[in-house]
Every structure is written in structure tokens, then in C-alpha cells.
Image (cartoon, grey):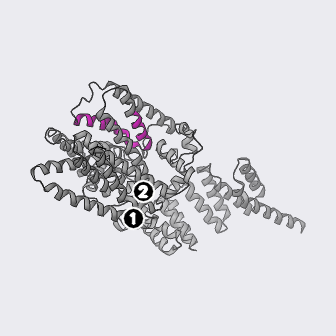
Amino acid sequence: MNGRMLAALAAALVALALHAPILGHGFVWDDAHKFGQARWDGPSDLAAALTPQYWTELSHEPPRAGYYRPVASLLFAFNQSLFGLEPRVYHAESLLLHAGVTALVVLLAATLFHASPTVALAAGLLFAVHPIHTEAVAFASDLTDLLSALPFIGALLVASRARDSWRSAAAIVLLWMLALGAKELAITLPLAIALVWWTRDLPVIRGRRRFWTSALLALLLYLTLRSWIFGDFAAAGAGLGWDGFYPRISAAGRSLTLAARMLISPWPLIADYGPAGAPEPPHPLPFIVPFLFLVLLAGSARLRARAPELPFALAWFAIALLPVSNLIPIPQPYAERFLYLPSVGPCIALALALDRLRRHHRWSAPAILVPLLAAGALLTARRLPDWRNEGALWSSVVEALPSNPRALQNLGADFERRGDLARAIELYAAAHDLAPRMEKVTTAYATTLHRAGRAQEALDLLIDHEAHNPLTARVAGMLGAAFAGRAEFERALGYFEISSELEPADPAPRISRALCLTSLGRLEEAQLELRRLRDEGVDPDRLETLASALARATKRLESQWVD
């Protein structure tokens, strides 16, 4: 085994050892729901994953989410069918993928810059211990970032060594499709390949006809499949209202500024920077940040002959961050996991810069590198326990960002699951004060108030929400249930009808409506609804309550006739 491979193996082992505690962690956030939704019906799903039917019936991601990730979906479905909801399986996969990506970072540094095994190892170690990666590694749902990064960097390694042949072009495109199938951020791989060729002073366009032809055909195929499945090319989160050149550039400036800050000074780390909503008011500073960055990038390009790692790091960071820069609005404006791939370039560049420094001052590089690695390892070790369970995760978010309503709501849900309704209500109330129009906060708050015996407060909360927001199926259903609980069946009936109209595929509001009809003595209408539900194949267990209520009501009516 040569020096490069030994360095790659050593860095991978460090990544494994440092993050090994996650094997004892459970699922957090939406892990269990997401993985529980995935289903595997056999090898035929490999082809079915390219069809709209798969994304409607089998995928963990519903079509409305706008995420087209067949590679990730198939992996989750396979895990679910073979192991069930077993957190250790997903965490073990994350560990192995992170170790693999770390090893490829070492090989990329050695190949692209002809770095010695020692310098390449330093790049891999910087990547392995960087605290910004804890979210991508410890959050099982973020396995998609790791799953995408591995073939992404693998394609760059192939591109950096191979000539322009149909075989190498096919290999690169195949790896690109695997990366895209894991997460959409891999869309920028051709730009990264162009950067690799430019860094190595190789032709980017001339003599690359086979690669660019193959890449263009692959991109057209991908976009066609995506359009077929979702009806358009829109990215997940499109339509959030971030319209106009100025707001989008301003949002991109905020993303770039926060990403740079997290990369350089990764503390405190926050799992959730808040839900997407109305765009923040445009501000001149974030608006000019992208242009300042472009000026810096252009200036660094002039130093390519003396310090090629500087333009490489800046360009890599921009290319890898572009899909999550908010130029196209995304549901989650900021997240630490977005920096998993963008951090590769800066880690390699820092190792090369330290080696350059070592040539002039022998002990200066170790004096900087060792404390950096120690600090990164300590911060990572300190951060990982925050991901061990729901309570730990959301407590850490609330401590760092007490103005985050979603974090308060999720922490309240954790207390509710543990039976502490008083503390849950307190947290829900704080979340509602911050985001009174956020439906999930309102419905969770109202449900817990009702469980605590404070039914009137729950009803008032829902009525106030209805007065200021468009009525949704969930809120209408909850209002119907609240009025039915007060025996106001006529009012309840109206809300159940609205809920059924808004969510026609859900039989629950129709069952509740039929129960109201039964309570109102309109038995023929209730019987007709029951027959329709049975004819539509609704689970008989879900209809048992309605059937029993109708049977009792019919019996009472018959006894009155006898009397």
C-alpha cells in the first residue's frame, strides 16, 4: 500500500473513531417518520423509482416535497424492509460514508495538487474533525448529503486522471447520476470538474467534446425525469415568495455570510436556524456580499501560479454552495449540513497553505495544525451528544436560539410524549407567541390544551387561528372535533365537510361527519356514507366506531317505536 492510500486509511479511521458515539443514538426530528414511510417491494423497485407511481406510493418523499432522490429513497426502503426502524443501521451507514468521503478528500488533495502523503493526510484530518460536519453525520436523515458527496468526489478523481474518452465520460456521468439521485446539490458537478481541470492547467473545453456531450445528455435526461414526476423543473421550496432579483441576491448574501462564518468559527452550532417564511427585509450589506465575493475570487485567480489553492478553495466553496444559496428559494434557508461538501475545498487549501508556511518556518505549520485538529475534535465530541435524542437536540437549539418557534414546538412535543403536559403547554405557548400564524404550532398547542382538560382555551385558540388564516383540512378537522365534543353537532358538521373537501383522500373527516349525522338522528345519510366508505375499500377497523354508533342509534330508534 503506497503512502497516499495509507494516509487515506488513517484519515478515515480518525473520522470513524471520532464519530463512533452516534451508534448509540436514536432517531430525531423526522427520522422515524421518513424512514417508516419508505417501502421496498423487491428488485422491481429499482426501475420503478424512475416513475411517478413510485413517488406517489413507495417513496419516503411525497411528490409535493419536490425532492427527486431515487438513490436515497431506495436505500431507505431497503433498510426498512431488511432491518425495520433500527437507528444503528442508519448511523453505521453514515459512519462508513463519512469515512469514505474523508478518504477521498485525501486522495483528491494528493491527485489534484500533487500533495505529499503528509499534506494530503492533513487535509483529510481537517475534514474529518471539522465540527460543522456533526449534523450531516449524526442526523440520520442527512445521510443523503454523505451519499451524494461520495460519488461526487469520486467523479472528480476520475476526471482529474482520465483523458477525454467515452469510457471515462460514461464513468463520470454514472457517478454524477448517483450523486444527483442522492441529493440535488450535485447538480453543480460539471462546474466542479471544470474547476479541477482549470486548477491542473488542463483544457476545460477544447478536447473535452465527449465529456460535455455526455454531461449534457445526462442532464437533459435527469430534468426530463424530474419534470415527468413532478410536472415541472421547480426545485423543492419554489414558490416561497422570494421573488425578484434584489431579494434573491440579498438572501444569497445572507447564506454566503452565514456559511463562511460557520466554516471559520463553527460555534455555537444550531440544528435548526428556523423555518422558512416570509423573506427577511432586503438589506444593502447582504446584497453586496455576493459581488464582493466575486471580486475576491477574480483577484485570487491572478495568484494561481503562486498559490493555486486559494482560487480553488474560493471557487469550490461557491460552486458547492450554489444550489443552497437561496437564489432559488429552498424550504430550509440555512443548515450546517449544507457545508458538508463546500468544506472540502477549504480543508484542502488550508493544508496546502500550512505546507507552504512550513517551508519558510519549519515549526509554524505543526504549531497551527495541531491546535486546530485538537479544537475540532473537542468541539465535535462536545456537539455529538446533542443529537442523541429529541430532548437533547431541541434543548440545545432553544438554548442557542430561544426565538426559534419550531424548536420550542418540538421540545414541547418531547415533553408531551413524556407526559409532562404542563411543561409542554408552556413551550407551546412561547412558540405561539413567536409565530401565532404557524399552523403546526397552533394545532400542537390546541391539542395539548385539550388533553390537559382546557377545552375552551383550545377552541378559542383554533377560532382565532381561523380568523387570521386560510382554513386548512387539519384545522377544520380539529374545530369539528372541538364542537362535536361540546355536542354542537351542526357546527361540527360544517367543519368536517370543509375538511373533507380540502383533503378528499382522507376518510377521517368523512367518518367524523357521519358520526355527527348519527348524533343528529340523520341515520339514513350516515348509513349511506358508511356504505360509500366500505365500497371505497376503507379499512374496516377505521369504520368500526361509526358502524357501532349507527347500530346503537338504530336500536334506540327501534325501541322507541316499540314503546
Query: Quarter of the image containing the C terminus?
Result: bottom right
Q: Is residue 493 visible?
A: yes
Cα gap from disc 1 to disc 2, whole angstroms: 10 Å
Q: Earlier in the sequence, mark 1 or mark 2?
A: 2
Q: Where does residue 448 sit, x and y in percent of width and height?
A: 54, 69
Is 97 situated left or right of 38 in this image?
left
Q: Which residue is mark 2?
A: 139
Identify residue type, mark 2. Answer: Phe
Query: Is 406 or 471 nearer to us in this picture?
Result: 406
Q: Is residue 335 visible?
A: no
User: In the image, is residue 202 above or below residue 143?
Assistant: above
Q: Where does residue 38 sit, x and y in percent of width and height?
A: 54, 49
Q: Main secondary structure of the magenta part?
A: helix
* SS assignment at label 1: helix
The magenta segment: 173-199
* SS assignment at label 2: loop
Q: Where does residue 68 sit, x and y in percent of width and height?
A: 47, 42
Residue farthest right in this picture: 562
Q: Which residue shows up at 30% across the image and 61% down it?
A: 377
Q: Where does residue 247 sit, x and y in percent of width and height?
A: 31, 47
Q: Which residue is mark 1?
A: 386
Identify residue type, mark 1. Answer: Asp
Label 1 packing within 10 angstroms: few (<14), some (14-19), many (20+): many
Q: Is-magenta flag for residue 42?
A: no
Q: Which residue shows up at 26% across the image and 34% down it?
A: 197
